[in-house]
Amino acid sequence: MPKLTDKVAIITGSSRGIGRAIAERLASQGAAVVINYARSEQEAHDVVEGIHASGGKAVAIQADMSVVADIRRLFGQTMNALGRVDIVVNNAGPLLAPKPIVAITEEEFDHAFAGFARGSFFVMQEGARAVPDGGRIINISSVVTALLAPYSAHYAGSKAAMEAFSAVLAAELAPRRITVNVVSPGVVETKMLRGLPKELQNMLEQRTPFGVGRPTDIAGLVSFLASEEGQWITNENIRCDGGIR
């Protein structure tokens, strides 16, 4: 029995990878989903077509989550197309190359924080304005903020900011029974993982007892938090990481 019937979910950065898996899972549970993309138009429309073919409801909306005006337009277009927003999954962000702190340029630093820190902040802001009482805001971070691996300062730092924003927003929205949580994936089969140097990939995989995860592993946890069963879970950072240490 679908658990999210009549709900509307925005999943940022959902044309591929973890975002796509989350969108497909929520759609399979009855939610109408917004497939957000910045540049991957064809991939986004492929996701929409696949959801439609499975009997679900989805629309694709282009918006760059590093641009605040685009974030606000995304929410406005969603309201116009679907009438409401019940669930916000804050997933989008740029691909970043691992680098030591001494080699990170000002432009690379700003790029990381525009996507993962500033972008996630204003997605949460719009979510807080749009989501009705009892809604859900779910922020996708990373176990890197706990592992603090070398060459990850710009990534870990910008994701840590997202986690701080999430905790503050959870307290602010508690009177409205809106849950705000963080999901922190570990080593998952994505384009980002395969863009890392091979030796770093091998090290991460060796530290993960369950091996490399799939985007659907993350989607299952997000689906639970978005459902009625997740109504008493808020201000948590839940690691979904295959036991990485």
Image: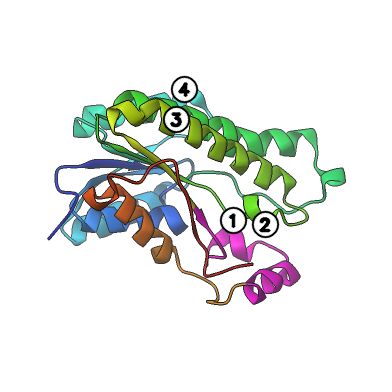
The residue wearing badge 1 is: 143
The residue wearing badge 2 is: 147
Outermost residue, left direction?
1
Type of amino acid under label 4? Ala
The residue wearing badge 3 is: 169
Type of amino acid under label 1? Val
Q: Where is residue 80 drawn, in percent x and y? A: 23, 27
Instruction: State yes or no: discs 4 and 2 in contact (Cβ < 8 Å).
Output: no
Q: Which mark is residue 118?
A: none
Counting every numbered tag in the picture gives 4
The residue wearing badge 4 is: 69
Q: Where is residue 209 drawn, in percent x and y? A: 57, 77
In space, the residues marked 1 and 3 are separated at their CA atoms by 20 Å
In space, the residues marked 4 and 2 are separated at their CA atoms by 34 Å
The boundaries of the magenta stretch are 184-207
* Foreground disc of the pair 4, 3: 3
Q: Around disc 1, counting alpha carbons within 10 Å, would you say few (fewer than 14), some (14 to 19), or many (20 or more)? A: many
Type of amino acid under label 3? Leu
Which tag, 1 or 3, sits closer to the chain's start? 1
